[in-house]
Image (tube, rainbow, N blue to C red):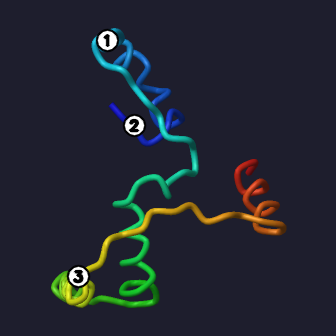
Amino acid sequence: MILDNYCTHKRNADWLDKYQGRVQFHFTPTSASWLNQVEIWFGLLTRKALRGASFAYKDQLRSAIESFVAKTNQHPKPFHWRKREVKGSQLRNTIINVRN
């Protein structure tokens, strides 16, 4: 079983221990949402269709999401998974954010 990261599940140690030996748990690293392609897709949706938008009704939000999906599906192509390399000040800012 792959779980998003160990930190979230520390409080569930009793629950996890019940399955020890029958299930092998693998935890993704903290701050590694780039490993999860669904999270990458939601990030694209957020940046390209939702950020800065305001919706008075759920139907407007649904329409914006459906439009994004329809536009994306017009020219489907394989998703190339990669991890962005972090350098210099980006690395320093990442370390500061992790420590806070």
Residue 68 in view, yes or no: no
**Disc number placed over residue 69 in the picture, else none:** 3
Callout 1–callout 3 Cβ contact below 8 Å: no
Where residue 26 sits, quadrant-wise, is top left
Q: Is residue 47 left or right of residue 99?
A: left
Q: CA distance from mark 1 to mark 2?
A: 16 Å
Q: How would you rate the neighbour count of disc 2 (Cα within 10 Å): few for under 14, some for 14-19, many for 20 or more?
A: few
Where residue 44 sits, quadrant-wise, is bottom left
User: What amino acid type should be assigned to the residue bearing mark 1?
Assistant: Lys
Q: Position of residue 42 (x, y in %)?
A: 37, 69
Q: How would you rate the neighbour count of disc 3 (Cα within 10 Å): few for under 14, some for 14-19, many for 20 or more?
A: few
- The residue shown at (44%, 19%) is 13
Question: In this rendering, is residue 80 above or below 6?
Answer: below
- The residue shown at (30%, 14%) is 19
Residue 43 in view, yes or no: yes
User: What amino acid type should be assigned to the residue bearing mark 3?
Assistant: Val
Q: Position of residue 65 (x, y in %)?
A: 24, 82
**Disc number placed over residue 38 in the picture, else none:** none
Q: Position of residue 35 (x, y in %)?
A: 47, 52
- The residue shown at (42%, 68%) is 80
23 vs 55, nearest the viewer: 23
Quickly name the residue at label 1.
18
User: What amino acid type should be assigned to the residue bearing mark 2?
Assistant: Leu
Quickly name the residue at label 2.
3
Where residue 64 sits, quadrant-wise, is bottom left
